[in-house]
Amino acid sequence: MNSRQELPSWQFLVEHAQQMKKQHLNDLFANDVQRFDKFSIKLPHLLLDYSKNLVTQETMTGLIKLAQDCEIEQWRDKMFSGEKINLTENRAVLHTALRDRSGEALILDGENITETINTELAKMEDFVRKVRQGEWKGHSGKRITDIVNIGVGGSNLGPQMVTEALKNHSDNSVNVHYVSNVDGAQIAEVLRPLDPASVLFVVSSKTFTTTETITNARTAKSWLTSASFDDEAVKHHFVAVTSNLKNATEFGIGADNIFSMWDWVGGRFSLWSAIGLPIALDMGFDKFMALLEGAHQMDRHFDETPLETNTPVILALLSLWNTTFLGSQSQAILPYDQTLHMLAAYLQQAEMESNGKSVSWSGEDIDYQTVPSIWGGVGINGQHAFYQYLHQSKNIIPADFIGSIESSTPVKGHHETLMSNFFAQTEALMSGVNEQQVREDLKAKGRTQEYIDQLAPHKVHQGNRPTNTILLDRIDPLSLGGLIALYEHKIFVQGIILQVCSFDQWGVELGKGLAAKIQTELAEDGEVGEHDSSTTNLINYYKQMRFGK
Ligand code: F6P
């Protein structure tokens, strides 16, 4: 038992969960006409309705008590003020500082990082203007028309998700492309239609050591230089975003063309830094700043609002409730907006890389469920794919439904069809349909008794499946910034309560190290023999079939 489980508030929730498992959401709604008012929060650009969760006022009071016992407010202050809360790497966690334009000094290890951030933003602004206005020329003097961002994980998912979400806010001054996979198919496909004379590569890698990114960057470099350009061309066609100046310079990128990253910004929280450069190149610097402002407004809400009405806190507590106390193992992210089609992939990294851990801060094994696995996709397509599972499988999958009042791309007659499905799904997941209702319905349709007896059990939906509804006014830089920051802070709160180190990712290292060893073995002659028999035989079979060695 770790110290969290010893808390009376934790123990209360364990017992309370057993009682709540016997409840049905239909009854909770029937018994309380004010349920929506009690369990929803309205913010300037967003409405959160969490009333379709298996909670009562007693549950919420218990969860808030747990948050207080875990000193959420104190931890929040530590994060905002730059204490080194990334315990295993002894680093501050200051993505919030990247979007704080108040100008207030923030001193970290003797350095005023507000100034550092402002300097970098000014450099970005200047660069973005030059590229978008055609002032920045390629090696042969041509205007830049295409940006190719090369990066993976946090150096890809955030910028690409935002670029997709805000497609309608781009003025198409440049076309932005993303390459993340080391599978040559992706870079080949992206480069095929492009003219090397008018392409600018942004190599985004905090460490500048990630093999996949460096491999893609080298391929891009030789594509450029083999197009009758010399090595000098790299200076006109490559910029980097990194904290590893040395490696980026050795790669051939001019020091002036290197944008900074810092160890106090985690990769998966970095789109607010120069890692967001492709966003700014696509939409313009002002809109990038609006994205930051939206996130900053959410930071203020998180920092200043009592826990009871604090949206990131509430979302974190509900996830904890559904997962750790009620036993769900996964959670679906279901945007009803085509532009948010990468949101689930983005949140997968944000939440799973942050909190998918099983030892506590002090290194003890944790014997409670930490975070759920995150998956999902755009709602309507999901309805015709995996929603069957959401409605009738043995597993309860809590889901976040995210929609917007205004359509991103108004096309007559479409938005109401989309949104009627949005509302219908959370209603259906919650209320279900019992056998009596099914039988009455079939009878009303004139079906035979035999047919009704046979079909009725298949048409029963138990309901009682928890959902959150997040309704944005519209999807624009301001609201999207807020939405992303909402999830960032949710993840932070979850991590504190679960007592996991949310800001490291040691679980990614093991596979990386093994892959490097195997890559050497693939290049050597002869069979390998030092792995387990499965891996050894697989590698040898591959080598034999591919190289005949
Ligand atoms: O996927 C593991 C990871 O370490 C992520 O945390 C990070 O966002 C990604 O690799 C890319 O790292 P880098 O920006 O250093 O290339």
Image (spheres, grey):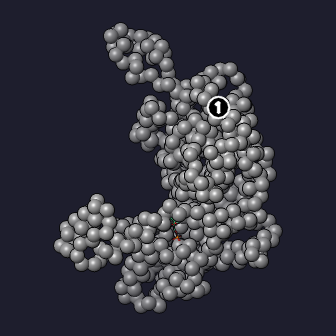
Q: Quadrant of residue 549?
A: bottom left
Q: Which residue is mark 1?
A: 15
Look at label 1 and name its amino acid.
Glu
Can you tell which quarter of the image residue 109 is in?
bottom right
Q: Nearer the viewer, residue 138 or 251?
A: 251
Residue projecting furthest to the left: 548
Q: Position of residue 357 (x, y in %)?
A: 55, 54
Which residue sits at x=65%, y=60%? Answer: 291
**Is the CB of the residue bearing disc 1 within 8 angstroms of ligand 1?**
no
106 in relation to 50, above or below: below
Left or right: 124, with 73 as reference point: left
User: Where is residue 431 shown, x and y percent of the image?
Assistant: 55, 25
Q: Picture coordinates of residue 424 (x, y %)?
A: 53, 31
- The answer to which of 177 and 81 lies nearer the viewer is 81
Q: Nearer the viewer, residue 109 or 237?
A: 109
Helix, strand or loop for disc 1: helix
Question: Residue at image x 77%, y 58%?
Answer: 77
Look at the image and tell me in which quarter the N terminus lies. Answer: top right
- Front residue of 536 and 453: 536
Residue 14 percent location from the top left of the image: 63, 35
